[in-house]
Amino acid sequence: MELTRKWWKIRRLSRGGRDDEDRFFLPTIDDFQPLDSQEQEEMVRSFERAHEQDNHLWRGVFAVFLLGYVGFLIYSIFQQAWNPWELRYHAYFMEDVPSWMLISADLVAILACLLALKGMLDGSIFHQTLIWHSFYVGLVLSVFWSYYMLRLPRFRWDVLWLPFGPLSAATICLYVDSILRSSREEIRTLQDYMYEYKRR
């Protein structure tokens, strides 16, 4: 028992005589002093700048992914047009789907990705509807490819991206867009609180 007391005493002194609860807090000047209006405005402006940077960064990242996928689909269309059934993921459907229908499906997938891309690059409400349109087009494509995949003699897991590629891209874009919008709304709410406080 005596040994335990000595150990606690040494430990407390090694921390500068602070209580156990104090070790979890960073040193501050005064946590209870409210910010004046200028400090509040600076803080809100810094939040806005950080949000704008994040907004451009994440929208740009997903736009690059979508462009890469569009480039791959264009390559796929040209391969199917000049060398039909050479690509393995198209050759699976040789018996059931005509070549022009595969090319049309890839064109529709490009349309879905471009709609999502346009919606991601401009964060307005109107352009958010473009992402929803991309989602619906991806849903139609998903039904189309799923129907023909289920008609295959053996289910092919390596072409699962065909029905779910554009649909997943649109879903991820909707998720990222909603997160960025909610972040912007929180900053606006903070601004409203600040202006309400100034009016009092």
Image (cartoon, rainbow, N blue to C red):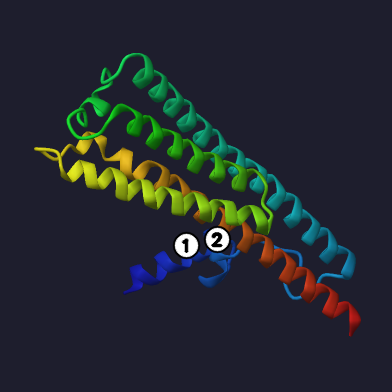
Cα separation, mark 1 vs mark 2, equals 7 Å
Q: Position of residue 114 (x, y in %)?
A: 55, 39
Q: Position of residue 85 (x, y in %)?
A: 26, 21
- Asked if residue 186 can be seen in this view, the reply is yes
- 96 or 111: which is nearer to us? 96
- 187 or 177: which is nearer to us? 177
Mark linked to residue 15: 2
- Under mark 2, the amino acid is Arg
Query: Do the CB atoms of the residues marked 1 and 2 lie less than 8 Å apart?
Result: yes
- Image quarter in which the C terminus is found: bottom right
For image coordinates 15% across by 43% down, the residue present is 151
Residue hosting label 1: 11
Judged left or right of residue 10, residue 31 is right
Q: Position of residue 14 (x, y in %)?
A: 53, 58
For image coordinates 59% across by 57% down, the residue present is 129
- Under mark 1, the amino acid is Arg
Snapshot quadrant of residue 115: top right
For image coordinates 35% across by 29% down, the residue present is 100
Q: SS at mark 1?
A: helix
Judged left or right of residue 150, residue 31 is right
